[in-house]
Amino acid sequence: MLDKRINLMVAWNLQESTLKDVKESRFEVAVLPVGSTEPHGLHLPYGMDYYQAKAVAEKACEKAVEMGAKVVMLPAIPYGSNRNSLGFPMTISLDQSTLNMVVRDIVDSLEHHGVRKLVILNGHGGNDFTPLMRDLYGRTGVFIVTVDWWKTVEDVRSIIIEEPGEHADEFETSIGLALFPHLVHMEDAEEGFVNTPKVKSLTYPWARFTRPWNFLTMNSGFGNPLKSSKEKGEKILEKAVERIAHLIKELSDPEVSEGFPY
C-alpha cells in the first residue's frame, strides 16, 4: 500500500512535510510566498497579503504537482516593506534591504540542497525583488523569478471587476471572500475614497513618489469594495492558479545550464 502522505502529495508543502517525505522527493523548483502585515480597510485582515500569497502558492503548487512538476512550497514570509503605512496602528514593516537579506539566505540554502530554481510569489505591491535578482545574477547558481501574483490576471480583472482600485478594493475583497470569508467583514466595508495631491503634476503616472497611506486614504482602503463577491474572486483565482502552475511546470522540466533559460 502506498504511504498515505506521499499519495496525497504532501511533500510539496515543506512546512507540512516530514524528513521521510522530503527524502523520498525530488525538487526542481521552490516557491516562496511573500506578503505583508498592514491594514486593509476596516473589513479585511492585516494578513491579507500574506494569506492570499500563501493560498495562491498552495493552489498553484498542488496543481503543478498534478501536472508532473517537482516543486516545493517554502513557508511564507508574513512581513513586507510598507513604511508608508506606519501611520496606521500595528503596521509591521521590514526594510526592503532586510527582506533581501532573508531571501539571499534562502537562496543560499536552496543552492546547498541542489534546488536550482526559485519563484518568489509576491502578494504585496510594496515589495520589490527586482534589484535583488540583478544583484544575485552570476553570484548564485539559482535561477530566480519574481511573480506579483495579481499581475498574472490583469486581463481577467479588467473584465470581472467593475470598480478598479488599489487596496482593500473590489478585487482584493473578492479574493478574500473566495479564500477566507470568515475573515472578511462586509458590514464594515467603506467606499474607499482617496485624497488627491495638491501638486497636480503628481497625479501623472510618470511622476513617482512615496505616498503616505494615512494621508492618502481615510482607513487604508483605496477603491470601492461594495460590489465584491466570492464568485468574482473564484473566477480570478482560477486563472491565476492556472497560469502560475503552468510557469512552475515549465520551470521544472529543463535542467539549469549556462545561459538558462535561453
Image: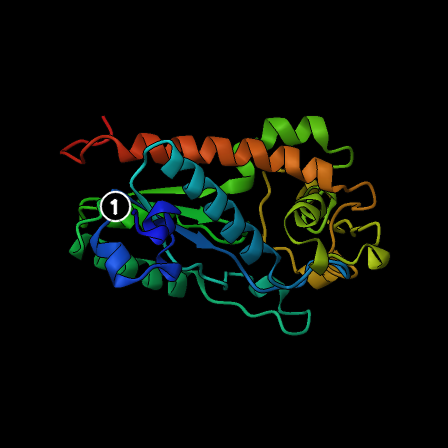
Residue 254 placement (x, y as % from top left): 22, 30
In which quarter of the view is residue 65 placed? top left
Residue 121 drawn at (x, y percent): 44, 47
Residue 47 x %, y %: 60, 62
Q: Name the residue under label 1.
A: 27
Q: Can the viewer see residue 114?
A: yes
In the image shown, does 220 or 76 lie closer to the viewer?
76
Residue 100 in view of the camera? no
Horizontal arrangement in the rendering, residue 38 relative to residue 136 (left or right):
right
| Pick the front one: 217 or 237 | 237
Instruction: State the scheme by which the image is colored.
Output: rainbow
- Point out the residue furthest to the left here: 258
Q: Residue at x 43, y 60 (%)?
A: 96
> Residue 23's spot in the image, x, y percent?
20, 55
Q: How many numbered circles are shown?
A: 1
Residue at 63%, 49% (x, y): give it. 179
What amino acid is at disc 1? Phe
Mark 1 residue element:
loop
Please state which of residues 218 and 153 is positioned toward the viewer in this rendering: 153
Of residues 227 and 262, the one drawn nearer to the viewer in this rendering: 227
Is 38 rendered above or below residue 222? below
Badge 1 crowding class, 10 Å Cα cut-off, few under 14, some 14 to 19, many 20 or more, is many
Q: Quadrant of residue 84?
A: bottom right
> Quadrant of residue 211 in the image?
bottom right
Q: Where does the C terminus fall, quadrant-wise?
A: top left
**Residue 66 position (above or below residue 209):** above
- Taking the view exactly as shown, the residue that stands out farthest to the bottom is 90
Residue 48, placed above or below residue 145? below
